[in-house]
Amino acid sequence: MNAPRRSVRSLVRRHAVFGLAVLAFAFVADRPAAAQGRTTTNFDAGWRFHLGDVPAAKNAAFDDSGWRTLNLPHDWSIEGPFSKDNPAGAAGGALPGGIGWYRKTFNVRTTERGRLFFIDFDGVYRDSQVWINGHYLGKRPYGYSSFRYELTPYLHFGARPNVLAVRVDNSKQPNSRWYSGSGIYRHVWLVTTSPVHIAHWGTYVTTPVVSARQADVTVRTTVRNTTEQPSDITLRTTVVDSAGRVMADTSFEARLPAGSVQDMAQQLSVPNPALWSPDSPALYHVVSRVECDGRLCDDVTTPLGLRSFTFDAQRGFILNGQRVEIRGVCLHHDLGALGAALNDRALERELQIMKAMGVNAIRTSHNPPAPELLQMADHMGFIVMDEAFDGWKIAKTKYDYHLDWDAWHDRDLADMVRRDRNHPSVFLWSIGNEVREQGDSSGIPIARELAGVVRRLDPTRPITAGLDHPDTFNYVIRSGALDVLGFNYRDSLWAGFPQTFPGQKFVATEATSSLNTRGYYKQPSDSVARFGGPWMKNPGPTPNKSYRLSDYDNRAAAWGSLHEESLRAIRAHEYLSGMFVWTGFDYLGEPTPYGWPARSSYFGIVDLAGFPKDAYWLYQSLWTERPVLHMFPHWNWTRGDTIDVWAYTNADSVELSLNGRSLGVRHMGADTLHLMWRVPYSPGVLRAVGWKDGRVMATREVKTAGRPARIELTADRDTIQAGGRDLSFVTVRVVDADGVAVPTADNLMHFQVAGDASIAGVDNGDEISHAPFQADSVRLFFGKGLVILRAGNTPGVVTLTASSDGLASATARIHLTRDGRRPQPGR
């Protein structure tokens, strides 16, 4: 038993490592071929790319030496210019689409003959076609699906190279209601197995009984025998904890006929399990090993979280026997200045910012996410609503998924469920968002069909959909296909939900739609505006000339609510299980309410660069236990102005003073979500003191800044991992001679990098900026800018220098190490 346990521990370490370094590398198997198990190798490096259609590029002999060399993931649209004439329109981010080709040349050792080779694409946007050595493998229209092709029959072994060619067609636009990106924008993996192996997504782990005393685990494994001979196998299945300790194991012997596929079910029990929850995301793993005639043929490691949950018509969401409020946000898939190209660290940063706000749930709006998001959600503790489609058969845009619906929807949905059903973070399947069939009788059979696909593959999780017309006439609701009714907005109807839908279960799949520009404040703050859109008869107030929307919580889309309105509504009734706020981050495209010249959204609680807007601290004051006292706005105004000062806090009361003179005490009531003082402006120091239970809980000061004097650089991490993928996000701001940040600064910053790193992107959160993200300069927007440094391959020290006319420059030092850990002093 000792030797197998050591092997199991090494497998779990290889597949379950999670830290601040790039997550994907933890899932790469580098075992030599002699071990005869599975190898999964990252296949992102060393591709050649050409923008434009070159039909001959599918041929292996095609000369691509003049093409650009790059590493995946890659998004070519983010590299293009913003323009109102781009076919995607402002809703699509005002960036170009087109057709692109990717080619990769590689060799396979002769010792690998007899093994099977597969290429796994996590996502290609969109309408991809793939060839290996000139042989056509297939196409995949939907840009968010993960898919696999077998390469084995067409491979060359030894010195003769292999050529993988991929054509990506994102020329037919608009095909999305937000920015999609273009290209092979997620990771690619080369997988090798023995001819007898576990099928693609061939493990399915369920936990029919979970309690504090014992968890029962059922593992269903699909094993393929692709040989022409029967094979005697042993399937050994082990449950291990995060330290690699064996908690349960079992084995099963079978004879697989030639060319057969066999499903096997095994039962295991874990005593006294650590239960998975957002506050304590305890993880186990299931290690499945197939032995053929006593030797290892294949092995797969599957995540396992032991938890029980249900949605209840009276009490909302119940997790491990306790009511838990779903405190969620919706997230689109772009990563701001990096576009749609997945970067593991950038995604991790987003989730860390959300976690610090108090978020415990993510909605993958409105498409299947990158696999890495679910891996991170498992480890970090997020409840995930996994969503399949934004539209069904009735079109929303001219070239969207409705064109592929008939041929592909069954496979795309089934593949999403098979890929994601083992993640403990996934709690809800969403079969659609605001589909047009809500008002068409075809919604009944389609909803039932989709729900049937999901239940056939995973009957353990409930099904919902984002419904923007959640009434009794809605055909999707009338289908009876949904286990949980998903309300998009309509918070005025939440209180009457039990009467309108007796016995049904509720989740606010989309809530709020507040509109804000970070750092911009229009007085007075109690002037509330509702904005529609150009498609509505009454689009709302005329845009101001700057296209800014106040960072006070007083601007919202006509169909939505202010942050405080939705929060009050969701807190009022226990049967309301929770909500997903639209949105956690600003995103490229859908610049409601303006359209061009805006090219990104105003909805986020955090701006596109990752800088929180003021509402961030409203949620933190309600969704976390940490002491919160956030006072705003800044204190650089004109004498004679009257300024509304707000505070978000979980203190009992707050006293505000200006230059030592008290402006009064405000008290938090049961329904109070912010405090306000109306203050005649005078330069100096605003000071807020928060009291809780008779003691000072927190203090906060906002000072008037003088003239800009020097630059400050602050890196989110000053030590990152060498290897070409890890990132350091460096905030740029200007301070006066006394070190006070200048909140209105708009200086143009120039950057220089010394050492093995490069600038991956710059940003400032400005919704109407048309400056490129790939640049060595950025103009500050309300006092802040961002530069993203990408690590090179060589360990050492990287120096980032920022300069601007009339200001003292600044330097940040970033350490590149092999493991992403800061070197010890003296080394």
Image (tube, rainbow, N blue to C red):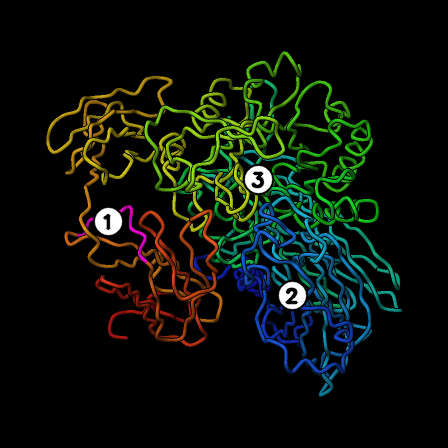
State the extent of the magenta-drawn residues as a range: 739-747
Which image quarter: residue 478? top right
Q: How crowded is mark 3: few (under 14 residues within 10 Å), some or many (20 or more)?
A: many
Q: Which of 203 and 515 is in front in this view?
A: 515
Q: Which of marks 3 and 2 is in front?
A: 3
Residue density around tag 2, few if under 14, some if 14–19, many if 20 or more, within 10 Å: some
Residue where numbered disc 3 is placed: 363
Task: Tell me, yes or no, whether the highlighted magenta stretch contains residue 204.
Answer: no
Q: Which mark is residue 741?
A: 1
Residue drawn at (42%, 68%), measured in percent from left and top?
819
Q: Callout 1: 10 Å neighbours few (<14), some, many (20+)?
A: many
Residue at x-position 54% and y-position 43%: 331
In the rendered image, residue 741 lying in the magenta stretch gets the answer yes
Which circle, 3 or 1, is nearer the viewer? 1
Q: Distance between the residues labelled 3 and 2?
A: 26 Å
* x then y, percent, for residue 681: 19, 32
* Element assignment for label 3: strand
In the displayed structure image, the side of residue 546 where residue 410 appears, left or right: right
